[in-house]
Amino acid sequence: MPSVTHDDAPLLADLMPWSVAPPRLGRGWPAAPDPASLKARWDALLKAEGADREALFEPTRSRTPHSAVGQLPGHSGGTEKLVRAAGPCPEPVRVLLAPFDEQWLIPDHRLIDAARPELWRVADDRQVYVVESGADPRLPLLATGLLPMLRAGRVRPLFRRPGGLEPNLAPGLLAHLATRLGTEPDAVDVLAWILVAVRPGLTVPLTADPGRWARGVEAGRRMLWLLRRDGERPRLPGGRRPYVRAPLPAFPRTLRYDREEEALYLDEGRVSPVPAAAWDFTVNGVPVLEHWFTARTRTPAPGTLSAVRPAVWPQPWTSELLELITVLSLLSDIADPTADTPDPAPLTATELTGAGVFPVPAALRRPASVLNHLEEGPEGQFALL
């Protein structure tokens, strides 16, 4: 993080004005590390009737099997009340359930206490969701192309409309940056700079120095690539790539790390080399690798839908673990390349106010209307948004 102070640095909330409260599942069983378990849980729920179905559902004040809600945008979940639902499980989708923990979710509005449909409405392969990860000074923001279901801070989509249209940036910001830098940054460039330069208080020092900007954007784009994990898969240099050196057991129960060996042990199974930086990587004090492992091996309460899970360790989990080790190792090497040098041309909040970029119009802090977009409402009715 930057060590140079910028007392007049813009706020993230002004640079990316539209934000949404974090989604809230309300029950754990609609999400799982593997999609097959979710389909089995759905089948078990629908086979139950009456009070048994209600107990399995785990009702809250926001959702019961009698709740009437519309479809999640872009998905085909039913809209009849769950108490009389039938049919196959909606196809599970990949989501970010916790920092660096990609899992699967049944995309059915009836199962989710607060799904935040406005986030689903702008989801596509160009969207990037910026998530406030808390007070962690090392990583105040996460970025993901998946629907974020973290119980953390607010979510800021990079684009206000599908198709990469209408960047969620203060109006005039890109044009002012272009004038001051002598180059034309795009929305992804601004996001890249934000990721490396943001401070724990969610202020973002900006610069009008072209060289400083270019170095920050380069580092930020690499960080964004690692956080999104799309496109070409990340790889550590030859000789440093983690592999399974001793086979994993049918279902490991313990996880430990040997620093001298740089080895991660899942019971008697061994993965190495695992850099200490990956093992030590935390978000808000929570060790990422330990949390990832615990989410897949904790013993759920018997008789619940969460208890429906794989009997043996699925092979895809091993591949995900190896990639996660790689990502954490590479991320630990990224820092703001401008952090320890004075900025010769800081671009301040006062300057942006004088240029008319700030204050941001109130309308841009609310979601955009998505015209010609039909969504099925409760009990099969349609609404035009």
Image: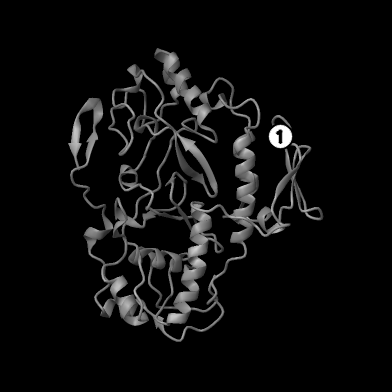
The quadrant where residue 366 appears: bottom left
Q: What residue is shown at x 51% (from left), y 39% (from top)?
A: 103
How many labels, in total? 1
Give the position of the C terminus as an image quadrant: top left
Q: Residue furthest bottom?
A: 344
* Residue matched to label 1: 253
Foreground residue, 203 or 179?
179
Left or right, residue 323 beside residue 11 = right
Please, is residue 241 above or below residue 169 in the view?
A: above
The quadrant where residue 61 appears: top left
**Residue 202 seen from this side:** no
Q: What residue is shown at x 59% (from left), y 22% (from top)?
A: 302
Q: What residue is shown at x 36% (from left), y 54% (from top)?
A: 157
Q: Where is residue 258 in the image (x, y as percent from the top left)?
A: 79, 50
Please, is residue 39 above or below residue 329 in the view?
A: above
Give the position of the N terminus as an image quadrant: bottom right
The quadrant where residue 210 appears: bottom left
Q: Position of residue 242 (x, y in %)?
A: 70, 50
Way the structure is coloured? one colour
Q: What residue is shown at x 40% (from left), y 78% (from top)?
A: 8
Left or right, residue 32 beside residue 63 = right
Q: Where is residue 39 in the image (x, y as percent from the top left)?
A: 47, 25
